[in-house]
Image (cartoon, helix red, strand yellow):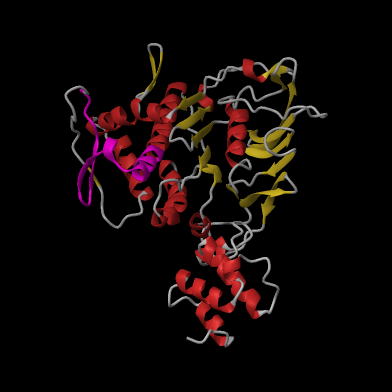
Amino acid sequence: MLKRLHLENVGPASVMDVEFADRLNVFTGDNGLGKTFLLDIAWWLLANQGEKPFPKQHTLNRPKIDFTITRSKNHEQVLESHKLEFMPRQQGWFGNPILSLGPDIVLGIYARLDGGFSVIDSLKTAVLDSASEIELSNVFNPSSLVLSADQSWNGLKNGDVILCNGLIQDLVRWQNHPNQSNFELLWKVLEKLLPTDEKIFPGETARLSFQDVRDIPTIQLAYGVVPVTHLSAGIKRILTLAYSLVWAWSEHQQVARLANVEPAKKLLFFTDEMELHLHPQWQRSIFPAILEAIKLLDPDIKVQVLTTTHSPLVLASLEPYFDEETDKLFGFDLRDREVVLEELPWVKMGEVDNWLTSPIFGLERPRSKEAEVAIEAAFALMRKADMADFPKHLQTQASIHQELQRLLPDYDPFWHRWVVTGRLPSL
């Protein structure tokens, strides 16, 4: 499991330090400050998979990566440190990378923002001799698998070797198999992830066109039977997530049987903005549902989660589950043109509006920007402050009142504050 990550002159920040929590690590902050970058680089270090991080240019100090993981050794958890440096002339990262996740048996799943997913299975890792100095790009890690959004649905091959059948073929195969254990597990996971009062059912497979000879799985929704290829973007993302969990776990169990060892008791789960495409009702339930769905794989599995979010509903949904002993909340911020990442204190905010106006999201009020400016102008007027900094249409009592009438509903609580002052213009 990940314990610590230290970056120098890599990514958006000059220096970035993270001490990971054992279970849940939640990263939030404005766009472009490095949330996805942090997930990608952590995954790259574990799996040697994906784009290698590009260092800052023209820096006096050489770009460095220093990270620590925990391993099981003689039934105890021990720390293991790794260091990498970027060599400009060779344009590569050199040091002592992770050559193998063994002897720990670990399964990792990364549900990416583009709709694809990545998997790392330590049982498939080749046994490599340790080396004191090696270029990371030369480390071949057969445990790594990257599927694009299209490949996660339609399969992935390497020459004549089928690496993954894909969601469409596997769902049909699992549904028609005499032993429907994978299909039943998928459906339990899917039902857990879909926050709907309407019961959903698997439909019969169906052929949809003259040209495509495949049978396509279908789902019985409240309004009728829908082929999975015609589902909404939100349901497709949840279906892909359910498939990635069940497929990776099923594949890992198959490999464990072939290797004659016990399956993993550790799961690394990365997810990037899981709320993307989801209705607010679904945003409020998706992450607790993910934690419960993982337990369907194995109730005793230990999971470490790294996730990013922009959603106050996601954070509000974590209030009943967040444990300060095992979980952490981190925030990215921009200060004096420098990106800063820091651990934030966990505070229950209650209503979603309170999350929106908390320092995490930084909104003055949970309103439109125009209404926020109008209310600020109204407060300034009531304080008899200088109105010169406000737009011209918000510098008098009458114009402010007119703008408030345009922007606020009749039942808005601000009207009570505006009326009590006695500053309503005569009508």
Can residue 262 be seen from the camera position used here? Answer: no
**Foreground of the two, 312 or 390:** 390
Asked if residue 21 is positioned above or below residue 113 in the image, the reply reads below
The residue at the point 48 percent across, 26 percent down is 146
Residue pushed farthest right? 60
Residue pushed farthest front? 392
Please give left or right for residue 56 compared with residue 267 in the image.
right
Residue 68, x across and y down, in percent:
70, 35
Residue 249 belongs to magenta span: no
Residue 227 belongs to magenta span: yes
Asked if residue 42 is positioned above or below residue 220 in the image, the reply reads above
Asked if residue 173 is positioned above or below residue 227 in the image, the reply reads above
Residue 281, x across and y down, in percent:
39, 57
Residue pushed farthest left? 210
The residue at the point 53 percent across, 39 percent down is 270
Callout count: 0
**Foreground of the two, 130 or 17:** 17
Residue 12, x across and y down, in percent:
68, 38
Asked if residue 279 is positioned above or below residue 86 in the image, the reply reads below
The residue at the point 52 percent across, 57 percent down is 312
**Foreground of the two, 144 or 355:** 355
* Quadrant of res 252: top left
The residue at the point 66 percent across, 35 percent down is 69
Residue 198, x across and y down, in percent:
26, 55
Please give left or right for residue 118 compared with residue 396 in the image.
left
Can residue 363 be seen from the camera position used here? Answer: yes
* Quadrant in the picture for the N terminus: top right
**Magenta residue span:** 213-241
**Foreground of the two, 391 or 20:** 391
Residue pushed farthest top? 160
Please give left or right for residue 173 compared with residue 256 in the image.
left
